[in-house]
Amino acid sequence: MKVIVADNDKLKLTLEGVAVGALTGVVVSVFRWSIGQLLTIFQGAYVAARKNIIIVLALFVLLVAVGLIVAGLLKKEPNISGSGIPQVEAQLAGEMEMSWWSILWTKFVGGILSIGPGLFLGREGPSIQLGSAIGQGFSEVTKETGVFRRVLIASGAAGGLAAAFNAPIAGAMFVLEEIYHNFSPLVWVTSLASAVSANFIALYVFGLTPVLDITHKQSLPIGLYWHLILLGIVLGLMGRLYQKVLLIMPSWYAKTRIPRYLQGLIPILLILPIGMMFPQFIGGGNSIITSLNSWGTSLWFLIGLLVLRFIYSMISYGSGLPGGIFLPILNLGAIIGAIYAVFMHNMGLLPLGFESDLIIFSMAGYFACIGKAPFTAIILVTEMVGSLSHLMPLAVLSLVAYVVVDILNGAPIYESLKERLNIDSDYLNRVSKLNDRLEMPIFEGSSIDGKYIRDIPFPKDILIIAIYRGESQIIPKGDTVIKAGDRIVMMVNAAKRVKMRDRINRLINGMD
């Protein structure tokens, strides 16, 4: 028996997604503007400090004060540490719960104070967590629970990324590919509505100019595509190195025996000499990306810039300060692309006119292999540079870099970071008597494709309540045949949601 799904819930969530996106757009735009203004002020102060010891001392005292304020926020609310994306993933997976208001204001203040002085941190991760907190708060006001509440949290995350980078399609795709891990129509429609709404606000505030307005003279000819293979291998190797170093940084910081919430003082104080020596190279790196192709053909200069950005990015993020790695990853990818272009030009194998192209391609490739989210990477860079002419080379380079990291057993960086979170066992105990909804897609080639439900060894702790096939809902019976493209909806114990999801994933993929 088939029953057509009513559109009421989808329409309601879409409208709520628009509202969540508008609120997120306002908050993230203020957040983004504040960081930009504060960075400009600090850059000027670092330059002035070169000739005045009084300014140096004043900046030192100010940075210590900033560090202590952020430390106080981290001690009060440890879940604002880092980008916030792993925390959002854990919350949507049912592994932890957070106080939306506490996250919202502490992440907002802590993010501005951590990123504004020029640390090599990005605004996008905090923007995603800010958006998710707004989505959670909105769901409490509207009294949405269960799956609807999770969808609003996810839609807020999409709006956060969209407003941070003026990239609404990438915002929705990131939620589907990296955070929610589910292409449910409820999720993508609501996330897209939120992302578009948030981006509209950001465009009104910051204008229509692409975030990365990179001038490129011509498209890469097919005859030079072999460079994408070589560059993809380089990016994959560098991406795996990035993953390993980033994940080991907290253990290195632990050796200092400084309390975790105070470890941010190290990069905050280090920014003073770095800012005085290289004021134009501090911050998330947006301006560096747009000016890379105007700095000539000095290979050693570019290598030095890469070393500086790589090492201090690790020091900044590894300390646990509220800040992301999205933009720093794109920045490092762009520099690697520039190094490759200049090296090949010096070897007589590539005209320098294609440097801008390789800078653009490398941003996508580096993020694709580190985050293991190639579709998000391709769409994000396309939206950020404001051009559709690079889709094919972006796809080729991203695929090669992704495969290299896959061969080297690299896991998605945000998933790896999530596994290192301190999961609240008390929360899991509190929800152990509650049921929750779990929705799993059946992909082409699944081991249960074409089988009757009665012949599939589903865990005893689940109850299949519906099967969605396109826009239709099927009431499940023992003789119902599972087909590729179906979405199976189950009721599970809320405390076992993650465990059941992993078991069913293995069952669907033929690993059990």
Image (tube, rainbow, N blue to C red):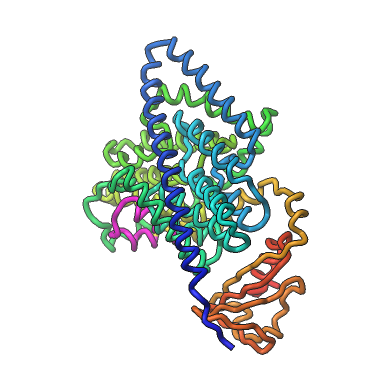
Per the image, is 104 magenta? no
The residue sitting at 52% across, 17% down in the picture is 61
Toward the viewer: 453 or 141? 141
The residue sitting at 34% across, 46% down in the picture is 211
Q: Residue furthest front?
A: 142
Image quadrant assignment for residue 306: top left
Q: In the displayed structure, would residue 348 be above or below residue 154?
A: above
What is the magenta segment's predominant secondary structure? Answer: helix
Coordinates of residue 207 in the picture (x, y in percent): 29, 45
Would residue 410 be visible to someone looking at this image? no
Which region of the structure is painted magenta? 374-396
Per the image, is 393 magenta? yes
Toward the viewer: 364 or 240? 364
Q: Is residue 355 left or right of residue 124?
A: left
- The quarter of the picture where the N terminus appears is bottom right
The residue sitting at 73% across, 78% down in the picture is 457
Would residue 63 be visible to someone looking at this image? yes
Coordinates of residue 43 in the picture (x, y in percent): 38, 26
Coordinates of residue 501 in the picture (x, y in percent): 66, 66
Toward the viewer: 496 or 30? 30
Q: Is residue 177 left or right of residue 95?
A: left
Q: In the displayed structure, would residue 63 be above or below residue 150?
A: above
Marks counted in the figure total: 0
Q: In the displayed structure, would residue 467 be above or below residue 411?
A: below
Q: Is residue 362 left or right of residue 178?
A: left
Image quadrant assignment for residue 82: top right
Coordinates of residue 113 in the picture (x, y in percent): 50, 31
- The quarter of the picture where the C terminus appears is bottom right
The residue sitting at 45% across, 61% down in the picture is 15
